[in-house]
Image (spheres, rainbow, N blue to C red):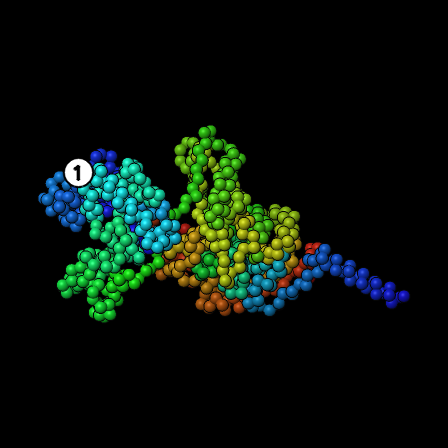
Amino acid sequence: MRSYSLLMNSVAMEELRRQMRVKFPQAHVVREEVSEESGCGLFDVGMFPAGAISEVVPAVKFSGISLMVAGLLENEGVEEAGGYRMVLVDGADGFDPGSFSDEACGRMLWVRCRCAMEMVKAADLLVHDGNMPFILLDALGLARRDLVKVPASAWWRLRQVAERTGCRLVVMVEQPLVPCASLRVGLNARLRLEDFDVEREELLGRLEISKLKFQNSSGRRMG
Amino acid sequence: MFACLWIPDFPVMAALRGATEDRPHVPCAVLAGGGDGMVGKVRDKLPILALNREAWLSGIAPGWALGRALVRCPGLRVIERDLEAEAGLREELFLLAESISADVEMAAEDAVVMDLAGVRGWGGGGSGLLQPAVAFRETACCQRGDPGSHCAGTCQCRPLAAGCVAESGSRLPQSRVFDALHLDGAEVCWAMAGTPDLAHLAVRFAETQERVVSSADLGGLPLGVLGALGGGGRTLELLGMWGLGSLGDFMKLPRQGVAERLGPEAGRWHDVLHGKVCRLLRLHRLPESFAQEMDFEEPLGEMDRLIFSLKRMLYTLSGRLAVRHLAAGSVELKLFLERGGELVRSLRFPEPQTGVEGMLAPLQTMLEAVRLESAVVRVELDAETTFAMAGQREWFGKNLPQPERWAETVAKLEAMLGSGRVGVPVREDTFRVDAFRVKGVGEVGVGWKPTLHGDCVLPLRRFRPVREVAVAHEVGGGFPVPLAILSGTMKGEILGRRGPFLSSGAWWDAAVAWQRLEWDVELRDGVGRLAFERPERWWLEGWYG
């Protein structure tokens, strides 16, 4: 009788767990740990979780951010949708087409914004649209006081829509900003004048990536 | 069986149709190469392209120089070539042929060939319709007192009018074909043969017109006819030197020997003349137009009413597309304003659209972003069509999951950010600083082409607009050498530098000529780019990384 009760309990628990998994799938996602090692893993889109917001923070100024964009554009493994590999929502209009190959430029949809609010609105439209699987939000160059004016609810809303559409949304910002980021990594390129004489591939290989903070679905910091 | 319709003296016939004055009764000619505005001896040397019937009767011929023709026919009037009228006449000729057969080829500027295989009543002999009618035509011509000789190049007969047939008293059931073989102001000749090329050759000569011809019937035609089959000027000359004067002489030669001595082209002529080659027709289809227009008695000042009118037009467009199993790839909208001027907008859909909703939503978003200066008095809508399944099918690319939403999203982004701020960056082929343009989404030719620039190892992050900074510098080697940035958010001591890099452009135009020096400088926080322009201005252009 007791064993039957235990069996029933375990069955009920399994059913309960199944229902919880169905109702809160995001809470049960097995998250990938970011490799502490530097290297081309950064240019694998799969590193950024789908249906979530990730944050990339450079160690100093803009260090390594444009190189990361170059790596993503030139990495053959990145999937395309409608002919575009990614959408770059350029908050401060800082992207320089002259620094990239013509072919790399042709793989990207460039959305040129003038301020933080325009950037968030454009991102909202794109994430809602659900056609683009990978969206880069470049908030570098925008004044911090403008960025903090973006209400936290806007980021949560973006995250909820991204969860629904499965979009990978990556925010590049000078200091941590997004309260609901699922992944936050730091980036350091340590660029010097001598680096003009080396190949870009070597520079990409030298990019250092480190896990900064990690948050679960409730937004509570895990480490 | 194939039939060929031909309008002799096509350029002059087309030009005379458009003439308001009574020119057809005087000798008229059209010159090759225009001749408009030319005077004197230069004009007299121009060859004649085409003549009307009166000019033919005076004894002159196409190819003659105008001066020579005027000696023979002093009353010859030169008329200007009318290309628009020719296009119109050509289209009428095509429609005439299409009323008989669905398979029509524009064999030449002035001739069409049609396949009669699928036409009821044309099977078997195929001439059952036309032959009796020719008899009626001759009868009618005789009743009108015309000579009745059906010579092609110098044809004396006017085309048969429907009324003439009625006057003859006994209209054949097939006589509607003859009614159709009439074009206002232009004569239409015809010939039939077993192959399209034979029919095309036969229609140009009086001896073989208006009947069914076989290879044997072409024997009496001059050898120069072969020129109509394309190429072979030297070969024709050689055949003339061999003493051949007619097609019959050429046809008697053994095919293998001709091909061995004169090449494969002469062998092909031989095959065509013997009816051994029956090529497929290059079918011609008139381009379909889906253009619509709507005039408003009362100018529309409200967007809602404009959208409502547009929706009505889209319903019509959608219906027409559905009937033809087509879809709209893009639409062009023209709004004519009450105060004059017009607004033209094109919208390309990411996927071909057939439904009203799929077309209306992006159009509506686009219109909402437009600020009109005055009310709209007229709307024109046109669509470029494509096949419904022809959009974005790639082997290795992934299609958009919801393409119908994409156009609307892009339209919303452009409405929010402005034109030229959403798209694919394309570098301009110039050394001017920060020269690029943004190709819109869906713009044709999104591909890239190589430019003058090499790729910089370190990608630059630009400041737009560039930031003017104060720089402490010294002069070295005739150039200003930066030592420290004194203002702005990136100020600090310069630890290292590369340069200077001198660039200039547009030196040929003093108004826009430019010249500048660039330095790559390393500060404590990273590496940036400084630019110097005279007189004494420093700019921080961007930051590498």
Amino acid residing under circle 1:
Val
* Residue displayed at 14% across by 46% down: B60
- Judged from this view, the residue extending furthest toward the front is B170
Q: Is residue B444 left or right of residue B406?
A: left
Q: In which quarter of the image is the N terminus of chain B?
A: bottom left
Residue B189 visible, this angle: yes
**Element under disc 1:** loop
Badge 1 crowding class, 10 Å Cα cut-off, few under 14, some 14 to 19, many 20 or more, is some
Q: In this view, does B153 lie to the left or right of B114?
A: left
Front one among A188 and A7? A7
**A222, above or below B512, in the image:** below
Circle 1 chain: B
Counting from the top left corner in percent of width and height, residue B472 is at 44, 55
* Residue displayed at 53% across by 59% down: B398
* Residue displayed at 11% across by 40% down: B74
Q: Name the residue under label 1.
A: B26
Front one among B8 and B543? B8
User: In the rendered picture of this protein, how many numbered marks are placed on residues?
Assistant: 1
* Residue displayed at 37% across by 50% down: B121
